[in-house]
C-alpha cells in the first residue's frame, strides 16, 4: 500500500512503505505524533500513516466488503487526519482512539456514498482477533468510557457498580444507602443516555 501524492490540498508525496523514512519517529507516541502532524510535520504524517494504514485498511475492508472502497476510506481517513490534526487535544483522550474515530467516520461516509454491491468479498477471517478487530474493540472501549464519564454522577455510579462491580440492584441500594426504586430509576435513565450517546457504536 502506498501513501497518496501531494495535491491541491498540500498532502504529502507518494512513498512506499519500504522507502518511508520514519525511523526517527519509531519511539514517538501516537498523541505526540498527531500533534507534530498538526504543526505541519510531513515526516510525522508518514510515520503515522506507516503505523496505522494497514489496520485502518483492515477495518475498512471488514466494514465495506470491497477492497477499492477500503482503499478510498484509508485515503479519506488520512486526508482528514492531515487536515484535522491541529484540533487534536491529548487531554481529551489518547491518539489512537482519535485516529480510529476519524477512520470510522470516513468508512461510514464511504458506505453511505456508495450503495452498489461490492466488487469482491473480503478475505475470510479465522482464529484470533486481528489488528482491525483489536483496533475496533479499543475504539469502542474508549467510546464507552467517554460516554460513562459524561453521565450524571448518580447514574454513572449505579451502572459501574452493576456492570463492572457485579452487584445486584439490592446490593447497590444497601451500599449507597438509597431506595431500591432510586437505583432502578438511575439505572434505566443512565442506560437510556448511554444508548443515545453510543448510537453509532451499538
Image (cartoon, rainbow, N blue to C red):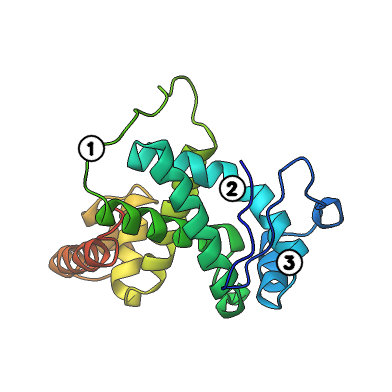
> In the image, is residue 172 above or below residue 128?
below
Q: Residues within 10 Å of mark 1 (few under 14, many from 20)?
A: few
Left or right of 103, for residue 113:
left
Point out residue 114 in the picture as x, y percentages from the top left corner.
26, 51
Mark 3, secondary structure of its residue: helix
Q: Quadrant of the N terminus?
A: top right
74 or 28: nearer the viewer:
74
Residue located beneath label 3 in the image: 42
Q: Are marks 2 and 3 in contact (CB under 8 Å)?
A: no
> In the image, is residue 31 above or below residue 163?
below
First in sequence: mark 3 vs mark 1: 3
* Residue 197: mark: none
Q: Are marks 3 and 1 in contact (CB under 8 Å)?
A: no
Viewer-side label of 2, 1: 1
Image quadrant where residue 158 sits: bottom left
Q: What residue sits 41% from the left and 58% below the top?
A: 106
Res. 141 in view: no
Point out residue 41 in the picture as x, y percentages from the top left corner.
75, 71
Residue located beneath label 2 in the image: 53
Residue located beneath label 1 in the image: 117
Q: What residue sits 64% from the left and 64% below the top?
A: 6
Q: CA distance from mark 3 to mark 1?
A: 36 Å
73 or 199: nearer the viewer:
73
Point out residue 89 in the picture as x, y percentages from the top left corner.
59, 77
Q: CA distance from mark 2 to mark 3?
A: 15 Å
Amino acid at each position: 500500500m502506498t501513501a497518496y501524492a501531494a495535491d491541491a490540498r498540500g498532502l504529502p508525496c507518494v512513498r512506499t512503505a519500504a522507502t518511508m523514512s520514519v525511523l526517527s519517529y519509531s519511539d514517538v507516541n501516537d498523541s505526540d505524533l498527531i500533534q507534530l502532524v498538526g504543526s505541519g510535520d510531513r515526516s510525522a504524517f508518514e510515520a503515522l500513516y506507516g503505523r496505522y494504514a494497514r489496520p485502518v485498511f483492515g477495518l475498512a475492508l471488514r466494514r465495506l466488503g470491497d477492497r477499492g472502497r477500503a482503499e478510498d476510506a484509508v485515503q479519506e481517513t488520512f486526508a482528514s487526519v492531515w487536515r484535522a490534526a491541529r484540533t487534536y487535544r491529548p487531554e481529551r483522550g489518547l491518539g489512537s482512539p482519535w485516529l480510529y474515530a476519524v477512520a470510522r467516520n470516513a468508512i461510514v461516509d464511504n458506505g453511505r456514498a456508495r450503495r452498489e454491491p461490492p466488487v469482491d468479498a473480503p478475505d475470510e477471517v479465522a482464529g484470533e482477533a486481528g489488528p482491525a478487530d483489536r483496533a475496533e474493540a479499543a475504539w469502542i472501549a474508549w467510546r464507552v468510557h467517554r460516554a460513562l464519564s459524561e453521565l450524571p454522577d448518580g447514574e454513572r455510579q449505579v451502572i459501574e457498580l452493576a456492570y463492572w462491580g457485579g452487584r445486584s440492584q439490592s446490593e447497590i441500594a444497601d451500599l449507597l444507602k438509597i431506595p431500591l426504586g432510586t437505583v432502578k430509576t438511575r439505572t434505566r435513565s443512565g442506560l437510556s443516555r448511554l444508548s443515545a450517546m453510543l448510537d453509532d457504536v451499538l
